[in-house]
Image: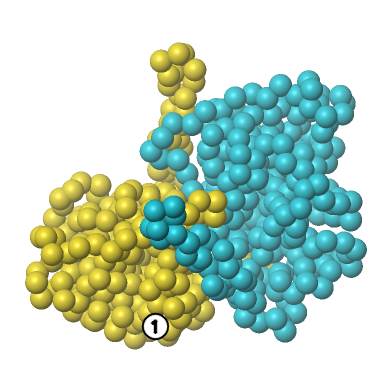
Chain colours: A cyan, B yellow
Amino acid sequence: MEILITNDDGWGVQGLMVLARHMTRLGHVTIVAPDGPRSSMSNSISLTKPMTMEKVDLSDCADFSDEEKKHIDAYITSGTPSDCVKLALNVLFGDDPSRIDLLVSGINHGSNASINVVYSGTMGACFTGCEHGIKAIGFSIYTHEQPTDMSHFEPYILELTRHLLDEPWSPLQCYNINAPLGPLKGVKWTRQCHGHWEKEIEKRADENGKPLYWMTGTFVNEEPESEDTDEWAVANGYVSVQPCTADMTRYESL
Amino acid sequence: MEILITNDDGWGVQGLMVLARHMTRLGHVTIVAPDGPRSSMSNSISLTKPMTMEKVDLSDCADFSDEEKKHIDAYITSGTPSDCVKLALNVLFGDDPSRIDLLVSGINHGSNASINVVYSGTMGACFTGCEHGIKAIGFSIYTHEQPTDMSHFEPYILELTRHLLDEPWSPLQCYNINAPLGPLKGVKWTRQCHGHWEKEIEKRADENGKPLYWMTGTFVNEEPESEDTDEWAVANGYVSVQPCTADMTRYESL
């Protein structure tokens, strides 16, 4: 198998390296990651400025064993997660998506459940995979701490990937997987919880007294009692597996 | 009615000013627009840097009549289209989405049909409206030329807005409206066409010979014969009205 990996937290973060290490057990891994944080960049792509893309010398990289390094090529780019997928596809795989058997994105540090899925750069990369007919899975873990203990989640990564690859895939389909901190009770298939952010803007003055506005906020779960949502699953110790689509049509309205 | 307007082409572009002018006939208009182009920024939000937001003095603005100006307040921000919605909601409307009766975004210069909907900043603003329970409609016209003749499309703007406001709205629902150049044959309700971009990366060297990668490409319609798609509608002289959802769940897989 040929596995493409990207993320939105940037090259070198724990989640990316853990994901790549596990994926070497499935086949050859190509990492194309941003050169720094690209959180909440959604499906953003770089239309107005050129991008860089450079191969990473892994010889001194302590995250992978010598055996793992034999199965990994890595690149960093100045682009967004969606840019990384498009750069990989065009520059490394001859604009032929059939040469990529699987795209995995993450492991994101933070939640991509509920409405966060539309802002997530991790999932933006997956929706770009959908555009090109590439099977795509996004992984997230509910903590921003690094390093963090991911050992409870790690056994699920390959098991879920293998299981989902065996499922039927429709056009524009992908998966959004969210894991809480351990211990884990198992896996739940979920839908997107209805929720929103509130008190999102904090006003502070700059040194000249001019107002500046910072994004912050508190997430509000609008249906905390619903047991079929991604938020309920992670709040109750389960890995949430949300089947997603990049088809934005609301068919019930047609 | 209180109508919030934003776009992804930035303050002052023809599409925004035309949309605002028509919306003054429905009620009071608050424009919160980016200070420059934000095309293809999707649902991107600014987590890592502060934003500016300043009121625009409309007294010398030639796009609006004196009568229209009585019904318009305008602001420009350094943020993305989704940031504009969140800034407006929090800073101008006390974090109370019930004070905004309608969000309109656009008129975008270019296509937001097919897979472009997931990259569009215009539609990103609408999906942010969805998050907060605000009724949202995105408008696009199939040309990047400015100024361009929009007179064929203008009569549809208020008629469609009034019609859609009378429809039932579900949580996370919004609309993506795309218009071709004239003349128009009418309106079609549509679904998202399956399509993708190819040959998207152009490699050019900088002055030191270092490779730089530019986003470009050609859109490929994967189902040109399907008559129920947004691409078919605009290619055949109809205004496309696509009901959308910010719920990314693929329910058929559950």
Residue B183 locus on image (x, y percent): 15, 60
Residue B171 locus on image (x, y percent): 51, 79
The reply to whether residue B114 is visible in this rendering is: no
Residue A85 locus on image (x, y percent): 58, 39
Q: Which residue occupies the foreground of this view, A250 or A229? A: A229
Q: Residue at x 83, y 61 (%)?
A: A181
The reply to whether residue B196 is visible in this rendering is: yes
Q: Amino acid at mark 1?
A: Arg
Residue reaching furthest to the front:
A208
Residue A87 locus on image (x, y percent): 54, 33
Quarter occupied by residue B199: top left
Q: Which residue occupies the foreground of this view, A227 or A142? A: A142
Q: Residues within 10 Å of mark 1 (few under 14, many from 20)?
A: some
Q: Residue at x 20, y 77 (%)?
A: B71
Q: Which residue occupies the foreground of this view, B230 or B80? A: B80
Query: Is the residue B251 above or below the residue B76 in the image?
Result: below
Q: Which residue is mark 1?
A: B99
Callout 1: SS: helix
For the C terminus of chain B, the image quarter is bottom right
Q: Residue at x 89, y 56 (%)?
A: A152
